[in-house]
Amino acid sequence: MQIVHSLDPLRSAVAQLRQSGTLALVPTMGALHEGHLTLVREAKKRAEHVAVSIFVNPLQFGAGEDLDAYPRQLERDCAMLEKEGVALVWAPTVDVMYPQGFATNISVSGVSEGLCGGSRPGHFDGVATVVCKLFHQVLPDMALFGEKDWQQLAVIRRTARDLDLTRPHADNILGVPTVREADGLAMSSRNAYLTAEQRLQAAGLPAAMKKAIATIEAGSSVADALATLQSDLLASGFLSIDYAELRDADNLIPLDSHSPRPMRLLVAARIGKARLIDNMAVTPTV
Ligand SMILES: Nc1ncnc2c1ncn2[C@@H]1O[C@H](COP(=O)(O)OP(=O)(O)OP(=O)(O)O)[C@@H](O)[C@H]1O
Ligand SMILES: CC(C)(CO)[C@@H](O)C(=O)[O-]
Ligand code: BAL
């Protein structure tokens, strides 16, 4: 496994790998867990070679967010990736990614509005900009992202379509279902911020979401189900709720009542020092 930190060695490594087969990219911010490793395993099924990027991207963190606290553990991450048979780890420094004078921003409207785009202004500009750079740097045939970050996946697909990207083409931006702990909590690097008590309470998030989905699918009012979801989260120990919304699953248009198209329930809520996100499918019943 090659680990590279600057562009010239990256280009040589990519050129060498591409001579002997297809290349899949799994972009990450490191502090790897089973969710990330599942993306790597899915990538291995689909391509001869897998590259993983590890970069805590300052552009996608707002003022007062956890950029400094975000866990960084490159050696441990690389050891995990080596065991998975990853060919290349791309771990640029901030100066390599954003040299002095860097002034370009990719901003996606529509799908990035509201939800995490509302509670983290500028976040998806930072994501779209860095992901475009990662795609141009690694030139993968495909890229894999987790459905845990449902809105992020929609933003990246939109960017790839709008900018006519070919490496990867929008159709080769693949989503992987959320990997969960035994009690249902979505795996996330930010779960490490939780105390033991908060970690137990955090399982209240997927539980409350499942309950809300069952009532919506049974035909109850969406507004009532979302109101109950919010009070359930506060009762479980969550401090506040950034959003709890029902949206069209594909284009993320807000819904205030049932739709015949696939729907998604998306929630972000704060507990202790962590802001946790989750989303689940809601099956149309009309
Ligand atoms: N539980 C999970 N199941 C599936 N994919 C996941 C999961 N957690 C993260 N991913 C995916 O891994 C990729 C890298 O995500 P990232 O490094 O930000 O990890 P993370 O655990 O989501 O961290 P955090 O949410 O704390 O930023 C993204 O595509 C993300 O959607
Ligand atoms: C896609 C990503 C690697 C861009 O920094 C990040 O947002 C993440 O880890 O989900
Ligand atoms: N997994 C999304 C990256 C972020 O929260 O900034």
Image (cartoon, rainbow, N blue to C red):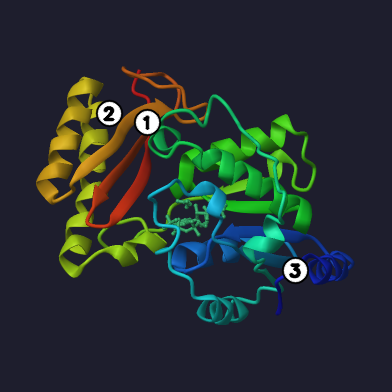
Residue at position x 42%, y 38% in the image: 116
Per the rendering, the mark at residue 6 is 3
Residue type at tag 3 = Ser
| Residue at image coords 51%, 38% | 122
SS for callout 2: helix
Say if 168 sits above or below 259 in the image: below
Q: Earlier in the sequence, mark 1 or mark 2?
A: 2
Quadrant location of the C terminus in the rendered image: top left
Callout 1, which amino acid? Thr
Residue 22 relative to residue 60: left or right: right
Distance between the Cα atoms at labels 3 and 1?
46 Å
Q: Nearer the viewer, residue 217 or 102?
A: 102
Q: Residue at x 70, y 40 (%)?
A: 104
Q: Residue furthest front?
A: 101
- Disc number placed over residue 283 in the picture, else none: 1
Earlier-in-chain disc, 3 versus 1: 3
Q: Position of residue 81 (x, y in %)?
A: 59, 75
Residue at the right extreme? 19
The residue that mark 2 highlights is 217
> Which residue lies at the image location 50% right of the left edge and 42% below the top edge?
123
Residue 224 appears at what percent x and percent y? 17, 24
Q: Secondary structure at mark 1?
A: loop
Q: Amino acid at mark 2?
A: Glu
